[in-house]
Amino acid sequence: MPTLSIITVVYNNVHTVGDTLASVAAQKVRQLEHVVVDGVSTDGTLAVIAGFNSPVVRLTSEPDSGIYNAMNKGIRLATGDIVGFLNADDVYEHAEVLTQVQRAFAENPQADVVFGDLVYVKENDLGKVVRRWKSRPYDAAFFEEGHVPPHPAFFARRSALLASGGFDETFQLAADYELMFRLLKIEQRPSVYMPEVWVRMRLGGATNQSTQNIRRGNQEIVAAWKRHQQDIPLRFWLLRYLRKVKQFW
């Protein structure tokens, strides 16, 4: 079976990082490491991590130049065959998630990418689902029709991430979008979609914290298409908006 590395980038998340650590530690999969990349937190986050007695946690704490710089650092530190990213305020849906991921890669040795679904939950209540992000298998019209895999439910072979160059750190809000766009659309990496909810994601991510960030994130999505000499079709924005609205149903 392929080995797994889960990367969590954290900076001053004292109130939520414990949930994330417990979620990964509860996974029943074998051959797992949890690479925690801290940006020198000052709010007690490091004490929470240090006090969490889990043999799978590998912690590094040093300054970085942003979230995607820290994620790239995590890729370099990881030793697993498969890499996934779990935010420091998110959790896995159940204890068998990474077993399902591992099995999907083992049963599809040609795949460089496996992705699933997630639900959004209230910041102060992990049990309260407020949005549902359901994806679909990748095809030639996937991005053109406004789809994108949910990044916390997106897993890739570490070899593919390294060969592709990891996250483009010139993006501040949409480097995850650009990386998935590059792997799936530009490089045509074989992928498998699993119609399973794998992650509970708290509302309040950086991209959606303000109308300014939403606008800036959209501008970076346009830049990602242009970076790869791709034209965004007219239907893209309408379908993208409709899919977001549908997530609340």
Image: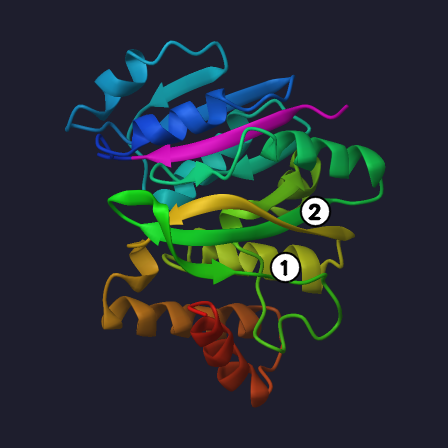
Kind of residue at disc 2: Val
Farthest residue in the bottom direction?
234
**Number of numbered discs overlaid on the protein picture:** 2
Q: Is residue 42 left or right of residue 60?
A: left
Location of mark 2 (residue): 113
Nearest the eye: 186 or 130: 130
Q: Residue furthest left?
A: 43
Residue 148: where, in percent of width, then height? Answer: 57, 63
Tell me which residue sits at (45%, 17%) in the image. 57
Indicate which label's residue lies in the foreground, 2 or 1. 2
Which element is circle 1 on? Answer: helix
Give the number of the disc on residue 182. Answer: 1
152 magenta-colored: no
Closer to us: 232 or 29:
29
Above or below, comparing residue 119 to residue 21 in the picture: below
Q: Is residue 168 visible?
A: no
* Closest to the observer, 203 or 178: 203
In this rendering, is residue 211 above or below 236? Answer: above
Q: Write the start and end of the magenta stretch as one range.
A: 1-10
Amino acid type assigned to the residue bearing label 1 in the image: Arg
Give the Cα distance between marks 2 and 1.
12 Å
Q: In the rendered structure, which disc, 2 or 1, sits on the residue that comes first in sequence?
A: 2
Q: Position of residue 246 (x, y in %)?
A: 48, 73
